[in-house]
Image (tube, helix red, strand yellow):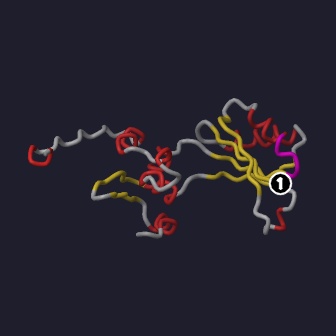
Amino acid sequence: SHILTELADFCDSVGIIERGRMLVSGRIEDILDRLNPSDMLVFEVLGDPERASGVLAAQGDVREVSVETYKANEKTRAGLVKVVAALEGRSQPARRAALLQALVEAGVGVTGLTTRQEGLEDLFLKVAGKGGGAAERFSVDTMRQLLGERPQARPEPKPEEAA
């Protein structure tokens, strides 16, 4: 299917084929977990994103913090920004609560918290190399290693093909 966002709603397993070569296959959930083994927590904060970023960056399991703004046409979001924390590994409810508590204790006005995970379309763009250039693309061997498979030997060219 070409509508990847809908594909995950009615399929458990997928295969991504490029130029006749199977790049990755398996259960969608397993593939996504292996290729993106960490959570992104999105805190919606009122006002001071620098303070929120500093509090989150000081936490031991937060590997990266970024700030995103809402689009200008989202009038109901005036004064709000998104502070995104990339964690080492998956976040458990107790860990999310502890991060939220640290922000509140530091005087940050938190109005929302969501978990962002990559979906099937994001996976395809990484695997097929269509999401942000060569740096974003996983090689086939890297894909296999991430998925716990052994890299396959490349077939030697036949003498008539080598010339």
Q: Mark 1 packing: few (<14 Cα in 10 Å), some, or many (20+)? A: few
Place of residue 30 in the rendered image (x, y in percent of width and height, measured from the top left): 45, 49
Q: Quadrant of the C terminus?
A: top left
Which residue is the site of mark 1? 111
Q: Quadrant of the N terminus?
A: bottom left
Question: Magenta includes 121?
Answer: no
Left or right position of 93 against 138: right
Front residue of 95 and 37? 37
Label 1 sits on what residue type?
Answer: Thr
Q: Quadrant of residue 124?
A: bottom left
The number of callouts visible is 1
| Rendered position, 58 above or below 12 | above
Q: Quadrant of residue 97?
A: top right
Q: Secondary structure at mark 1?
A: strand
Left or right position of 34 against 141: right
Q: Residue furthest left?
A: 160
Left or right position of 56 against 135: right
Q: Residue furthest front?
A: 163
Place of residue 91 in the rendered image (x, y in percent of width and height, measured from the top left): 64, 42
**Picture residue at 43% right of the left edge, 64% below the top:** 11
Place of residue 56 in the rendered image (x, y in percent of width and height, measured from the top left): 76, 37
Q: Which residues are magenta?
A: 46-50
Place of residue 76 in the rendered image (x, y in percent of width and height, measured from the top left): 84, 67
**Picture residue at 88% right of the left edge, 37% below the top:** 106
Front residue of 39 and 157? 157
